[in-house]
Image: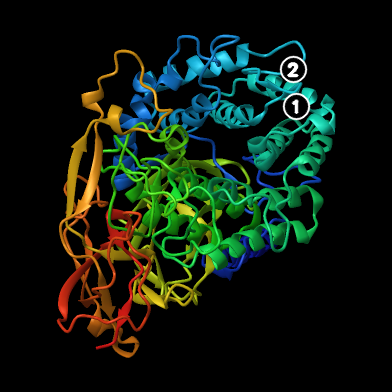
Amino acid sequence: MFKKKRNIGKLLLGSFLIVAVLTACMEEKREMKIDMLSRPGTIDRNVSYQGNRLPLKPLHFIKLPVGTIEPEGWLKKYLLLQKEGLTGKLGEISAWLDKKDNAWLLSGGDHGWEEVPYWLKGYGDLAYILKDSAMIAETKVWIEAAIQSRQPDGFFGPVNERGGKRELWANMVMLWCLQSYYEYSGDKRVLTLMTDYFKWQLTVPDDKFLEDYWENSRGGDNLYSVYWLYNITGEQFLLELARKLHRNTADWTNESDLPNWHNVNIAQCFREPATYYMLSGDSADLQASYRVHHLVRRIFGQVPGGMFGADENARLAYIDPRQGTETCGFVEQMASDEIMLRMTGDPFWAEHCEEVAFNSYPAAVMPDFRALRYITCPNQVVSDSKDHKPGIDNGGPFLAMNPFSSRCCQHNHAQGWPYYIENLVYATPDNGLAAIIYGPCCAQAKVGVNGTEVILREETNYPFEEMIRFTVQVSGKVDFPLYLRVPAWCKGATLIVNGETVAAGMESGKYVRLDRTWSNGDVVILQLPMSLSVQRWQTNQNSASVNYGPLTFSLLIEEEYRKVNSAENAIWDSKWQKGADVNAWPTYEIYPQSAWNYALKLDDRVLEQCLKVEKREWPSDNYPFTADNVPLVIKAQGRRVPSWGIDQYGLCGVLPEEGAPKSEILEDITLIPMGAARLRISAFPVTYE
């Protein structure tokens, strides 16, 4: 009997061993499972972060709460410059943020209705990300005032009535400020205020709803906030309001024409149909947003940098790369790309966001972030305070680096980098993480079916280097998938996990999904080899722009900075607070001190012989966006085009015809990243000899 029991015990032990071995094998298989995907799946439901509630279509990526992603490296340097520059100091110098008689602090106040939330949208998020107690306290002054402004009927904020209709645009911006504050604080008064306000909106007759120009164009911002609240509370009336907002917002679904051609409206509003698609489920709504994006670039965006020529409004025949975009347009385009990425999962939007962030936006501000310019162009060789209309659509001193021009960009610029940082790492429906817009950072998040807390550290000097290193910090072990993006421009990407190269079949323009059991200290290295490429712009004289990975390059022009009095060179509606030191906030005009009218020598068959990449040391101050600090340059050659000069409007002349005579002298020239060139030629005529 004893022997029989002992045999049974052996059998049981053997069975346990077999199960253990099989389980280990299965775990080993799962740990090394790697897939290439065009989009992440949306079947699963994240247990830690709220995505879209039914009947809304699921999000492909879920934004983490503000403050859970901390910038490092050059991105942190950028935020610190913002803090010490215009973003952080505007409350002390901008008349529109003066607390005395401010419309957001006093019923019947006479200023600040738009400027306060425009600025607070970025300032508050900057404060939460940096965990700066003084900035957070300042943010709460305005947030508290907004919450306390609630009226018995549910309306909140300043009351601006036109013909018996209340203007709603400023409130749309403040709603985004309140949403970020709720993410940071969990203050349920935000939910109460938004619920009551949206109930009030539902009572407004359609013929009195979203009638003003700005609110009519930008109703998609209001719609986005309605979804945000619905995903938290699930109240059904919000879906009815969503439909009302869509039918009363300007129609951005037209196949060949737009409601208006204002550059910021286009960058901000093209996403409205795609946003409504999350409720309608009609693929035509989704495709409409793609169509508007491509339509504008097909007509006015045949230029490098990701944007389009609309130096107030896009105009027929004004399509040369000397036309520019407002700084507001840059930051709103980046925000739209981020939202489109979360809704669609399409890696195209990550790529486009990086294109604008790295190439167009940095040159719109001074390196110390204490001044910005209203208009920045792909080809821009003068940055002065003169009126260049009609060469530039808007009349005024809009090309100089002035801390007070214009009211919109002066305040709205603040959102650009904070929002970018908030979108570096996402949660995914399958309880994983996705790092698909790249930059040095440290993200704290919950993963796996049990909501285990992990830290994902991303170390890189991207976009100036090819390697991105991810390190997982976790107590114990946890199963979750990690998504990384292989850019469309990248050929031959490689993936190294804990020192071993993984055979992943990396495909350009797709995501790699790495699903495994993660332990503390696990390291993933993504290598994204960069190579030279040239893009030709046939509509604009078949000009050429040079790319290296995600960076576009411009001619290195010697820049002369001239300090001028901001009070004498700002636009008519710029105002200072009493006591503000004008001398501490100068305007800078920038003039070329070297030739700029070069045709670039190219030979597509031997591109590397014409263009030679040189890598330099990383800047000691961690700021790579100046001509002196850039860690990458390209050595090239070019011939001057004598007929190409400053035109009758005082602007860089339009591109010369392809056959325009060129100098017999072939000169050595240097190209630098476009984002570091505040004077620049980034779309070149071409010479082949």
Quadrant of the rendered image containing residue 416: top left
Quadrant of the rendered image containing residue 14: bottom right
Q: Quadrant of the C terminus?
A: bottom left
Tell me the distance, in whole angstroms, between the alpha carbons under discs 1 and 2: 8 Å
Q: Are marks 1 and 2 in contact (CB under 8 Å)?
A: yes
**Where is residue 360 drawn, in percent x and y?**
39, 54
Which circle marks residue 499 in the picture?
none
Tell me which residue sits at (62%, 40%) in the image. Answer: 48
Dot 2: what SS?
Answer: loop
Q: Earlier in the sequence, mark 1 or mark 2?
A: 2
Q: Nearer the viewer, residue 338 or 322?
A: 322
Check disc 1 and report the residue beneath it.
198
**Where is residue 167 drawn, in percent x and y?**
68, 26
Specify the amino acid type for callout 2: Gly
The colour scheme used to paint the residues is rainbow
Specify the amino acid type for callout 1: Phe
Q: Is residue 61 visible?
A: no
Check disc 2 and report the residue beneath it.
154
- Residue 518 against residue 454 in the figure, above or below: below
* Left-right relation of 637 to 579: left
